[in-house]
Image (spheres, helix red, strand yellow):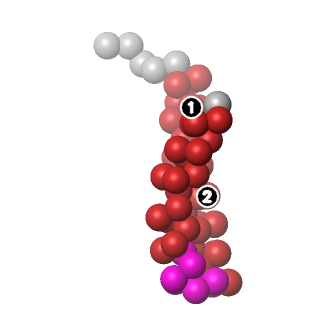
Amino acid sequence: WTRPTPLINLICSACLRRITINQNCYFAGLNYTSSTFASATNNIIPVVTFILAFFL
C-alpha cells in the first residue's frame, strides 16, 4: 500500500467540510423558520431534482 496523494486528502477534507457547512446552515436556518417549513423543504428536494433532470 502506498500513502494517498495530497490531492486525495484535499478532496476528502473538502467533502467533509461541505457536509459540515451544509448541516450548520440548515440548523441556523431552523432558527429563522418553523419546523414545518423545514420539513416541507426536505420533501421538496426530490421534486426539484426530478424537474432539473427533466430539463437538462
User: For the C terminus, which image quadrant?
Assistant: top right
Reading the image, the residue beneath label 2 is 21
> In the drawing, does residue 52 fall left or right of residue 5?
right
Report whether residue 46 is seen: yes
Q: Secondary structure at mark 1?
A: helix
> Neighbour class for label 2 at 10 Å: few (<14), some, many (≥20)?
few
In the image, residue 2 sits, relative to residue 13, either above or below, namely above
Residue drawn at the location 58% of the way across and 86% of the way down: 34
Mark 1 vs 2, N-terminal side: 1
Q: Amino acid at mark 1?
A: Ile
Of residue 53 and residue 6, the one placed in the foreground of this image is 53
Q: Residue at x 51, y 83 (%)?
A: 36
Q: Position of residue 22 (x, y in %)?
A: 59, 58
Establish if 6 lies above or below 27: above
Instruction: Mark yes or no: residue 14 visible.
Output: no
Q: Is residue 28 magenta?
A: no
**Mark 1, residue position:** 11
Q: Position of residue 33 (x, y in %)?
A: 64, 83
- At x 62%, y 41%, the residue is 52
Instruction: Please report the bounds of the magenta region as a residue range.
Output: 33-38
